[in-house]
């Protein structure tokens, strides 16, 4: 396995996140990303199913260098209200767009290497300032126990992947559900992900696309 640290982090964090959320969880997508510019105000899911994300920046970040900005409690508000509030403006150029992101009265989560941020994926968040910064993240979704939950989770997992012409990772060396998930993680994870269609969806994406 080429990602032993990532697998070890999953082992460490999932029980903590299950305690925090009060529900059993499955790893939907774990990735290491190079962020190189701002991110506008958004949520990480449009699905009603419970999902949570753990994020760790590998460099020190603050309000001037691309730290995560969040709107506390926004996951409980009507999404349509926030869309109208945050996305209704027309911007003349990139500078006015960046200024609008920074002007929203938000909480900036400054971190150092070793810190981990955990948030509901329905929480509105953004980033502003800074250039290249590395981020490890793990998206976890409810492990369903009812037919209704299973349908919602299937739709959620299917939305994580797509029929892309190209992808920005190397699926040969870093498959989404590689040996680390199959062999080194809790035994319920891989069979459940396979049964819910996530493994097939990831395979289709990886086999049908070319690396950028």
Image (cartoon, helix red, strand yellow):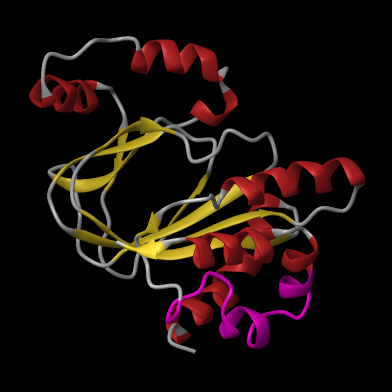
Residue 137 at x, y percent in the picture: 43, 61
Is residue 174 rendered magenta in the image? yes
Given residues 68 and 177, the one toward you in this image is 177
Horizontal side of residue 118 vs 188, given as left or right:
left
Given residues 143 and 198, the one toward you in this image is 198
User: Does 87 appear above or below 13?
Assistant: above
Residues drawn in magenta: 172-191
Given residues 23 and 28, the one toward you in this image is 28
Quadrant of residue 106 within the rendered picture: top left
Given residues 195 and 107, the one toward you in this image is 195
Residue 68 at x, y percent in the picture: 31, 45
Quadrant of residue 86 within the rendered picture: top left
Quadrant of residue 100 within the rendered picture: top left
User: Does 88 appear above or below 199?
Assistant: above
Horizontal side of residue 149 vs 58, given as left or right:
right
Residue 127 at x, y percent in the picture: 26, 40
Q: Which residue is pictured at 40% across the width and 30% down the height?
A: 71
Q: Which residue is pictured at 18% across the width and 23% down the height?
A: 97
Residue 114 at x, y percent in the picture: 33, 70
Image quarter in which the C terminus is found: bottom left
Number of disc labels: 0
Q: Which residue is pictured at 41% across the width and 53% down the height?
A: 165
User: Does 126 appear above or below 54?
Assistant: above
Is residue 148 rendered magenta in the image? no
């Amino acid at each position: 396995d080429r990602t032993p640290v990532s697998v070890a982090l999953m082992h460490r964090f999932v029980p903590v996140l299950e305690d925090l959320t009060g529900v059993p969880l499955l790893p939907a997508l774990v990735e290491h990303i190079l962020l190189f510019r701002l991110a506008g105000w958004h949520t990480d899911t449009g699905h009603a199913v419970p999902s949570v994300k753990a994020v760790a920046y590998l460099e020190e970040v603050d309000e001037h260098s691309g730290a995560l900005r969040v709107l506390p409690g926004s996951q409980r508000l009507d999404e349509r209200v926030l869309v109208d509030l945050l996305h209704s403006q027309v911007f003349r150029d990139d500078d006015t767009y960046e200024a609008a992101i920074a002007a929203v009265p938000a909480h900036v989560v400054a971190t150092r290497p070793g810190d981990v941020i955990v948030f509901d994926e329905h929480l509105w968040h953004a980033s502003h300032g800074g250039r290249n910064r590395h981020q490890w993240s793990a998206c976890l979704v409810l492990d369903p126990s009812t037919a209704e939950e299973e349908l919602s989770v299937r739709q959620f997992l299917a939305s994580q992947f797509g029929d892309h012409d190209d992808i920005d990772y190397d699926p040969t060396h870093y498959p989404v559900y590689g040996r680390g998930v199959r062999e080194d993680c809790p035994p319920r994870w891989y069979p459940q992900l396979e049964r819910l269609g996530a493994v097939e969806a990831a395979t289709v994406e990886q086999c049908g696309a070319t690396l950028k």
